[in-house]
Amino acid sequence: MTEKNHFDGRNYANYFNAHRHILPNAELAWLNDVRAKAISSFIEVGLPGPKVEEWKYTNLNLLKTTIYETSEKIATENTDIIQKYALEGVLGSKVVFVDGYFNSELSDVQKQQGVVLTSLNEFISANPEHAEQVFQESKNQDSLGELNTALMTGGFVLIIDENIKLAEPIQIFHIASEKSQAKSLRLKNFINIKSTSSAQIIEYFISPDNIDCWRQNVTEVIVGEKAKLEIYQFQQEGNETIHMNQTLADVKESGNFKHYSLNIGGKISRTEIKPTINGLYGNVDLRGAFLGRNGNSHDVFTHMKHMKPEGDSNQSYRGVLDKGGKSAFQGKVYVAKDAQLTNANQSNKNLLLDRGAEANSKPELLIYADDVKCSHGTTVGELDNEAIFYLKSRGLDQKAAKALLVEAFVAEVFEDIKLQSVKSRYLELAGSWLESGD
């Protein structure tokens, strides 16, 4: 273990050894072996410290000494929370997790020929050989990913056969209850959209205020040839939650992957998106916004890899920081030697509403091909006083004028969304966030 850069993680190994027998599917030898190898790999590296470049803006000091015990399965929660957050007019399946466990009573999984949508634990029980193969092909890329594999309590699996287009989006709810205090909620998810198929997924991350829990969500995605996948995420965690959400995407020839996110909650919030274009003409579009104040720390980390020629990628992120808010955008684009005719664009713009806010931006291009078009840009600024004065002269008060300008600033990254209910919710949440401030 590199002590200089990483925190010692042996306390997690001790916890794993004492509790491995109560983890889901503990009776399966091959899964026990997967978990044991994962915790061993985690221990070799440890928890990333501030001297790890990718984590320089996110302080994980708390995790050195505090053990967040694995959550326990609880009885069905009130359905009101699902009705409150679910989007109107979206009629597809609903998959609900409460405190890190699939809740069949709150979920509504619709059956369709050629589509597998189930909890990870049910998938493992029903298809052990297939599940073992999926885990063998898993692509953990860092120590926290290994920790997730070792201590996961479940997740979801979505497999769509060739030439199938889901008519309705799938909604997935990740809910933390009042009983998640001092608990870890670890899910590992697998998505495989096969050739010429398409799907849309809407994810919600919800936890109560003043509940100190650690959510760690890892999703591995395969987008097949000429397949399309769109993921829309709403992070509305409580003010004491540690939120970590990692998405790894393998995009095949002419595959199309889109990822949209809005982060407005959490004590520590980190969104990682790591797509790899592994086929000709692959296309990736990453967009999002993060809004922070009063101790919110938002970190968005992207690592876009172009491994094949004539791929396109776009990254567009907006940050709005009020007093006490902190953010970091770290966007990396890697273009391999053989990935000629790549077109990669990256943009991060930040708006400071108070001098007591902090915005960090670190774009990075690593280009090893000759014939490419790659660009990146970043800005940090304040609201235009002339624009505020103009709006006030038209009858708006100070707060309404600021809200209108902030909504317009954030709207840029969501303007191309075709699902009107999703687009409206993004803008509604951005507007209500500003109104809830002082």
Image (cartoon, rainbow, N blue to C red):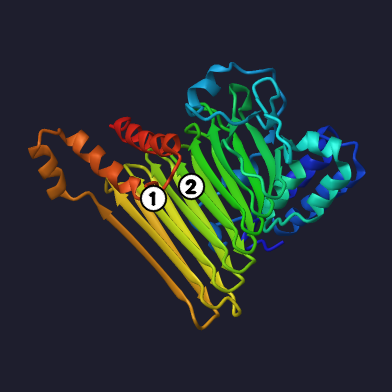
Q: Please say whether residue 51 is visible from this viewpoint.
A: no
Tell which of 289 and 372 is nearer to you: 372
Query: In the image, what residue occupies the spot 79% across and 33% down?
Result: 122
Query: Is residue 347 toward the left or the right of residue 140 in the image?
Result: left
Q: Please say whether residue 284 is visible from this viewpoint.
A: yes
Tell which of 226 and 263 is nearer to you: 226
Q: Secondary structure at mark 2?
A: strand
Q: Is 371 situated above or below 213?
A: below
| Residue 380, quarter of picture | bottom left
Q: In the rendered structure, which amino acid carries the disc numbered 1?
A: Val
Query: Is residue 268 toward the left or the right of residue 100 in the image?
Result: left
Neighbor class of circle 1 (other Cα within 10 Å; few <14, some 14-19, many 20+) is: some
Label disc, if present, on residue 302 of the rendered structure: none
Whether residues under marks 1 and 2 lie with C-beta atoms below 8 angstroms apart, the answer is yes
Extreme-bottom residue of the structure? 370
Label disc, if present, on residue 413 of the rendered structure: 1
Extreme-front residue of the structure? 163
Q: Secondary structure at mark 1?
A: loop
Extreme-left residue of the structure? 393
Query: In the image, what residue occupies the spot 47% across and 68% down?
Result: 344
Instruction: Tell me residue 180's x, y (percent).
Output: 62, 27
